């Protein structure tokens, strides 16, 4: 009915991005304006803020070096090696797009830390007044992050597209975002869990202290970890997923009909509507004083979902988009919701699995682990079925539109699943903010009632977190599948230019494809093992330090007035350890990709990416869900079930929770990013693999 | 140089099979003739024998019903549904082949139990005289099993081939063997680990008793479990792998050149040589009184390997076989050995991983689990690389011989890897025999010195077991890959007959293939979760029973003269529990296959089998290796390291060992069989999937 051009929709996208950034700024100001009077909290909050900023600065300095090296390599090799007589300007644009991706991703992390370390103090203070103001502070703090991340990702994609006008450059931008996210997520994940485990192990298990007891030398490190791991790491991660899904869809769309086709318009339109729906959802979040924060979070998520579905339908009608593609998007969104609900079944303490694990814990920690791990394995089934059905349905819905549309349909279903990502990030960032607020309330001596309010806010955060995690793993899976399609288009583009034969399939019966597939299986396993061993090593180091402080600082254990532990030492151990461990695992994944590509060429890479998706999905779902299950199972026991606090079941469930920590907060969610990075590396290097592989 | 016909080589195969069975009978007589005088041992040994036989009888009765139903279904549907006007005689032959497979597989288990429950007593007695006689008794007891299993599998395959003269019937025979193995392995695995965990948990951990303390009500059940799980289950399992690898190779060979081609001769020749080499290896096993049992085991394994390589080369030269195919077999054998060695690296207590996990255990059980699990993930890498390289090299070696030879090369590399399976089973069955002998020596009150000898024999068994496990998982992987080829041949045969289009590839980019792949990923995960939850549930039930007995039988805990626990009750709990849990997991795997095939047809099944292989290999390697690592890490601590017995590290490492038990002895090794069964079901039903699928 109406005609929209690529230029117009890009301008609209920029406007809506700006709107989101405006909302972020407004919420930030609002949070900052909240009252704050307690001195202890101010002091401890300042410690946390400093620790987080120090870590972030050191991490970004390290990653800046990595980025610089990568940028130089890009100028030499991408999109085509300079000695092949390519246009050097293309290579420079590609490098700039890459750097732009890393900078925006780093900014997402930085903004998150900035607001989270303020919002946690404000939320702790607000909790004195009740659930309502505390919830609003925590939620709006999270929303700053959500709006900033999604706003800047749409902004970045639109700008790259407008300025460079080349879909391949988007892959460079996306690779910048992903590679930074990979390291940030890994570094933050190792930091946070090493500190968390060590603090719990010595403080809670050995000495029977409460969580967040200020005598515990690792307590500040633990709180810093919540910010650098859960807030900054998660922000970078979802920035990357969001960009990758848009990049994959846009590469497909342009390969189908060029830069100015209706498909490109549709991708931008849907992405902009997703952001708009998230803004509306975030703005709609309300809770009355008697209200349930969990309900408030999920009702605003549903608002976002419904607004998205309606507005995309409206736009499809108005602008005459293909209804089949809208269908693919809707299927993605619907299945994403179903996956969220089934994930909830496996991790919610009102459902049988969590309770069965709590009951098993009565026989000791081995049973906690065996049963929790088993339910984790079972929990992969509904999510995998959901992904399989989404891929099948969205492909077949769109395939009748023409050659290549099936794969485009899959990429649109991923976009649909991620459409409400602004809302998801807001919910996700809410979690660590209120978790920290709870810690501050405890350390500030606000009393039982305030802590109970903070606990209620915290537990709502946990449930929502588990649901959104299933969502984002599934979306990453679908995105990577469409990146496989993007990889094939890239290979065939180079093949056509070089007069070589292209590839029309990745046949499992082809030994080269199969070879790649089997090697690909190992990569997510090795990657997550390296991260978890990093956590293990650092946590052991920090346990030794905590013991040292309790043994050598007189009066610390007894809580003598004026005796404070050496918080900085623990923060330093966590920082140094995380920085040492965060690079190798990512490098292994990237180098393995290059090695397989140079040995077996594009066919091997097709198999390799499939192997990565296969083992990545399996392990990510297993680890995230088992981790969430163990966490909630411990909370269920602590709530007085199966013997309650101090019982055998409680001790066993603490072991489960500790094992689950690096599962769900270090390895599990990093795998997402790992498979995305590997897919992007493969697409970017497709030409080199085609031209220079051994076999 | 010489001409060998299919008939001649089959006769030769039958003769060598008979020779193997003769060796088995001779060893059995020899073991039976060993002296035995101690009354306590005789009595306890009798308890174990009875318990094992009771379980086996009840298990086989249950499985007989399953077999009868399956046989009826086969008569109706396979190889073609009777209403399609197929020759009903074919269907009856297929059902008979299936039943023959189940019977031989069941016999393999029965023979194993028969000899193991005698050899354990004899070995315990022999240990009083020293390492040499005890080793020979244990080893020859194991060899009875090895020779019987491999002899009967070659016998069965040769007979089916001679009588029915149809390669597809071999798939029915193989399915009979595998489906029985699936249930036997699952049932035995659940029985043994439920009993083992419960006995350890109450006896060792709670009450500080030694392993195999006769006051422990679950001690006999634990020993019964070693027999029904490790001996009978393992025998059925390797019978099945061996048959499946021969079946896959023979289906390929006949599809390449018919029943009387040189390729068929070669498969039989190599299989017969493998058996011959195993006979020589077993006969060569010697140990002097000062000798190291571990060395004796590995040196006879090396003898087998070398004899096999030489004799196959000789036969290739004499009979003018293709050297390229010999090369594929040799690569399989070589890589199998390398995989064995790398597995050893991750599970041997002289190497860093086991020691790192022991060190981590000093900080508590959560660290034992996290680090052991991480090393388990890492350990998948060398094995996966080995499998990938074997597939790639053997395919490319044989591909120049003509269309279809590449896939045949892969199946021959699997045959090469499994060629020395007679030796492997002998080593594997040796383990539980000497483990039981150790228990009997303890219960018979033979004193420290004898127990130390039994311990030495036992620890040699553990190391060899870890190595052979890597071998058999890799071989199963390759076999299943070649079954994928067999599946495609079967589909195309039916397609040609029905005038339908055949399939030429399983393209990952095809959404139906991809759909199958993602669903296939979930199956090994769900299957192993169900088995482990079965162990968990039964172990909890048995823990309650042990507590009940200690609480209600006066004088039991104190070891009052004449007070004996109610061993039978524990055996009954383990039996009933295992029988209830063993069927559902297998049924889920089989039904999922049928559902995917009926929904998506052959393309979906191609992906589904790939997904099964992918997640099956990953999980099987992870679970087996992590389990072995935890086991040896506990033993390392018990040997006095990291604080030794009773320390924090010891308690933590016991938790690791307990978690590892169902990993390595229930779920891990059953996955092999599960993926084989699923592949065979797919091949058998290929026609039905082609003709009747929804999509």
Image: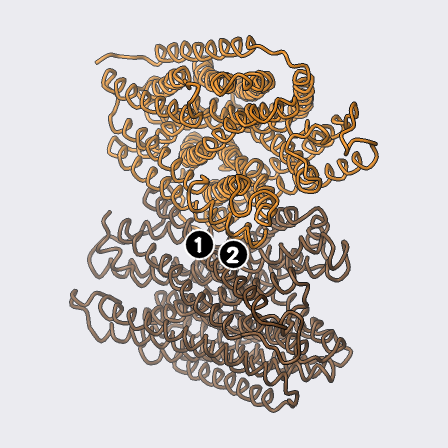
Chain colours: A orange, B brown
Other-residue count near label 1 (Cα within 10 Å), few / some / many at <14 / 14–19 / ≥20: many
Q: Nearer the viewer, residue B66 or B312?
A: B66
Q: Earlier in the sequence, mark 2 or mark 1?
A: 1
Whether residue B367 sits left or right of residue A554 in the image: it is: left
Residue A495 image point, x, y percent:
43, 34
Which quarter of the figure is the N terminus of chain A placed in?
A: top left
Residue A214 image point, x, y percent:
70, 27
Query: Would you say residue A687 is visible in this rendering?
Result: no
Q: Nearer the viewer, residue A281 or B509?
A: A281
User: Label 2 lies in what chain?
Assistant: B
Other-residue count near label 2 (Cα within 10 Å), few / some / many at <14 / 14–19 / ≥20: many
User: Label 1 lies in what chain?
Assistant: B
Whether residue B237 sits left or right of residue A405 in the image: it is: right
Picture quadrant of residue B665: bottom right
Picture quadrant of residue B443: bottom right
In the depicted structure, whether residue B109 falls above or below residue B597: below
Per the model, the C-alpha gap separating discs 2 and 1 is: 9 Å
Residue A127 image point, x, y percent:
54, 19
Query: Would you say residue B665 is visible in this rendering?
Result: yes
Q: Nearer the viewer, residue B655 or B206?
A: B206
Mark on residue B524?
Answer: 1
In the depicted structure, whether residue A346 falls above or below residue B652: above
Q: Which element type, helix, strand or loop, lies under badge 2?
A: helix
Asked if marks 2 and 1 touch (Cβ < 8 Å), the reply is yes
Residue underneath mark 2: B620
């Amino acid at each position: 009915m109406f005609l929209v051009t690529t230029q117009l929709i890009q301008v609209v996208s920029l406007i809506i991005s700006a709107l989101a950034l405006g909302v972020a700024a407004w919420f930030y100001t609002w949070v900052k304006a909240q009252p704050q009077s307690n001195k202890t909290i101010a002091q401890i909050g300042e410690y946390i803020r400093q620790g987080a900023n120090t870590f972030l600065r050191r991490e970004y300095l390290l990653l800046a070096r990595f980025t610089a090296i990568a940028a130089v390599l890009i100028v030499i090799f991408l999109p085509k090696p300079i000695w092949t007589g390519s246009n050097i300007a293309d290579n420079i644009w590609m490098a700039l797009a890459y750097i732009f991706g890393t900078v925006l991703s780093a900014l997402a992390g930085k903004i998150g830390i900035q607001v989270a370390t303020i919002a946690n103090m404000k939320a702790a203070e607000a909790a004195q007044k009740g659930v309502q103001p505390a919830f609003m502070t925590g939620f709006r703090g999270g929303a700053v992050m959500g709006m900033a991340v999604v706003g800047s990702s749409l902004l970045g994609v639109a700008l790259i597209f407008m300025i460079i006008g080349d879909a391949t450059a988007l892959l460079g931008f996306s690779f910048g975002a992903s590679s930074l996210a990979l390291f940030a997520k890994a570094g933050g994940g190792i930091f946070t869990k090493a500190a968390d485990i060590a603090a719990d192990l010595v403080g809670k298990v050995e000495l029977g202290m409460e969580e967040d007891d200020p005598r515990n030398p690792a307590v500040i490190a633990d709180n810093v970890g919540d910010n650098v791991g859960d807030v900054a790491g998660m922000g970078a991660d979802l920035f990357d997923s969001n960009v990758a899904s848009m990049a994959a869809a846009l590469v497909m769309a342009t390969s189908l009909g060029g830069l100015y086709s209706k498909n490109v318009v549709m991708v931008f339109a849907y992405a902009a509507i997703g952001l708009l729906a998230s803004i509306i959802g975030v703005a709609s979040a309300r809770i009355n004083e008697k209200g349930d924060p969990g309900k408030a979070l999920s009702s605003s998520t549903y608002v976002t979902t419904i607004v998205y579905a309606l507005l995309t339908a409206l736009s499809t009608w108005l602008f005459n988009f293909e209804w089949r593609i809208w269908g693919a998007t809707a299927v993605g969104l619907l299945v994403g919701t179903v996956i969220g609900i089934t994930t909830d079944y496996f991790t919610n303490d009102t459902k049988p699995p969590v309770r069965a694990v709590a009951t098993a814990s009565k026989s000791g920690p081995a049973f906690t682990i065996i049963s929790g791990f088993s339910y984790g394995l079972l929990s992969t089934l509904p999510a995998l079925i959901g992904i399989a059905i989404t891929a099948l349905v969205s492909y077949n819905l769109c395939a009748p539109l023409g050659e290549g549309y099936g794969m485009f349909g899959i990429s649109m279903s991923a976009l649909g699943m991620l459409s409400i990502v602004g809302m998801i990030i807001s919910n996700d960032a809410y979690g660590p903010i209120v978790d920290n607020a709870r810690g501050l309330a405890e350390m500030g001596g606000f009393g039982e009632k305030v802590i109970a309010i903070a606990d209620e806010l915290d537990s709502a955060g946990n449930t929502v977190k588990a649901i959104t995690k299933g969502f984002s793993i599934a979306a990453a899976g679908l995105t990577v599948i469409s990146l496989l399609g993007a990889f094939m288009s890239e290979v065939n583009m180079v093949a056509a230019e070089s007069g070589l034969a292209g590839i029309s399939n990745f046949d499992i019966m082809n030994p080269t494809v199969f070879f790649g597939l089997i090697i690909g299986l190992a990569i997510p396993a090795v990657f997550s093992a390296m991260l978890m061993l990093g956590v293990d090593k650092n946590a052991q180091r920090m346990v030794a330090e905590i013991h040292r402080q309790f043994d050598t600082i007189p009066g610390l254990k007894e809580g003598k007035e004026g005796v404070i532990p050496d918080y900085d030492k623990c923060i330093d151990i966590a920082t140094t350890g995380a920085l040492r461990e965060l690079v190798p695992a990512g490098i292994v994944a990237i180098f393995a990709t290059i090695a397989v590509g140079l040995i077996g060429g594009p066919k091997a890479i097709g198999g390799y990416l499939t192997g990565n998706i296969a083992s990545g999905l399996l392990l990510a779902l297993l680890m995230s869900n088992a981790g969430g299950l163990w966490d909630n199972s411990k909370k269920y026991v602590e709530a007085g079930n199966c013997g309650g606090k101090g019982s055998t079941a409680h001790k066993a469930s603490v072991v489960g929770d500790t094992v689950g920590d690096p599962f769900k907060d270090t390895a599990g969610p990093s795998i997402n990013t790992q498979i995305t990075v590997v897919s992007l590396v493969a697409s970017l290097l497709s030409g080199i693999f085609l031209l220079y592989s051994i076999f």
